[in-house]
Amino acid sequence: EAQVTQNPRYLITVTGKKLTVTCSQNMNHEYMSWYRQDPGLGLRQIYYSMNVEVTDKGDVPEGYKVSRKEKRNFPLILESPSPNQTSLYFCASNGLAGGSANTGELFFGEGSRLTVL
Amino acid sequence: DQQVKQNSPSLSVQEGRISILNCDYTNSMFDYFLWYKKYPAEGPTFLISISSIKDKNEDGRFTVFLNKSAKHLSLHIVPSQPGDSAVYFCAAIDQGGSEKLVFGKGMKLTVNP
């Protein structure tokens, strides 16, 4: 089954304690991205990756890091979480076969709800 | 600056009636538009899209209309069903430029039995 898998689905942590949210897709997609969803703000892009070893900032990258060492994995790292990073996080992927234009038709994971106390 | 706007946060309709969800955009470079649907505790799922070279795209009960001159698109659901109750996100992308997908803030649709 084609899917994007995120872990953990729920996490409560404390300020300053480093954490990583993993994301893995089994569709051999080149493009992967992280979003956060907050009430009244919709979906905002944190970071994205066009392919292995290629990452770039989205709209709200502050306080986050990512890496893309393998095509299937795109972890989101919070080095020193703060309460304003309490949010619902989504990983997404999209196949850009042969360099074709991005249609924006993303496959999303089920989300990771993070609470930072 | 919000480039994709869903000005109504919610909509409630009766089962069997038409649901019309509206979306406005400001960036004239957007050339592909999408609607996503999101249920609670799930990730968004792609619903329907439309290219800027068209003014209508239909898929079963779902139809998206695009009015480029007004920079406006709408999603029509006919007939509405209780299972359509969800948050709907409008999104747009400039395929020839940044290729960045921009989302609206979402609209909660409730279809009452």
Image: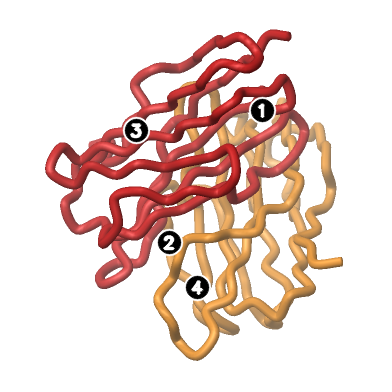
Chain colours: A orange, B red
Q: Residues within 10 Å of mark 2 (few under 14, many from 20)?
A: some
Chain of the residue on which disc 1 is drawn = B
- Mark 2 secondary-structure assignment: strand
The answer to whether the residues at label 2 and label 1 have Cβ atoms under 8 Å apart is no
Name the foreground residue: A37 vs A14. Answer: A37
Q: Amino acid at mark 1?
A: Asp
Q: Residue at x 87, y 66 (%)?
A: A1
| CA distance separating discs 4 and 3 | 30 Å
Q: Residue at x 74, y 35 (%)?
A: A113
Q: Amino acid at mark 4?
A: Thr
Chain of the residue on which disc 3 is drawn = B
Residue A105, numbered circle: none
Give how far across and how far down residue B10 sits, in percent: 50, 15
The answer to whether the residues at label 4 and label 3 have Cβ atoms under 8 Å apart is no
Give how far across and how far down residue A114 sits, in percent: 73, 36
Mark 3, residue position: B23
Q: Residue at x 37, y 28 (%)?
A: B22
Q: Residue at x 48, y 48 (%)?
A: B58
| CA distance separating discs 4 and 1 | 36 Å
- Mark 1 secondary-structure assignment: helix
Q: Amino acid at mark 2?
A: Lys
Instruction: Answer above or below: position of A28 versus A40.
Output: below
Mark 4, residue position: A55
Are discs 2 and 4 located on one and the same chain? yes
Lateral position of residue B95 relative to residue B108, left or right: left
Residue A57, numbered circle: 2
| CA distance separating discs 2 and 1 | 34 Å
| CA distance separating discs 1 and 3 | 18 Å
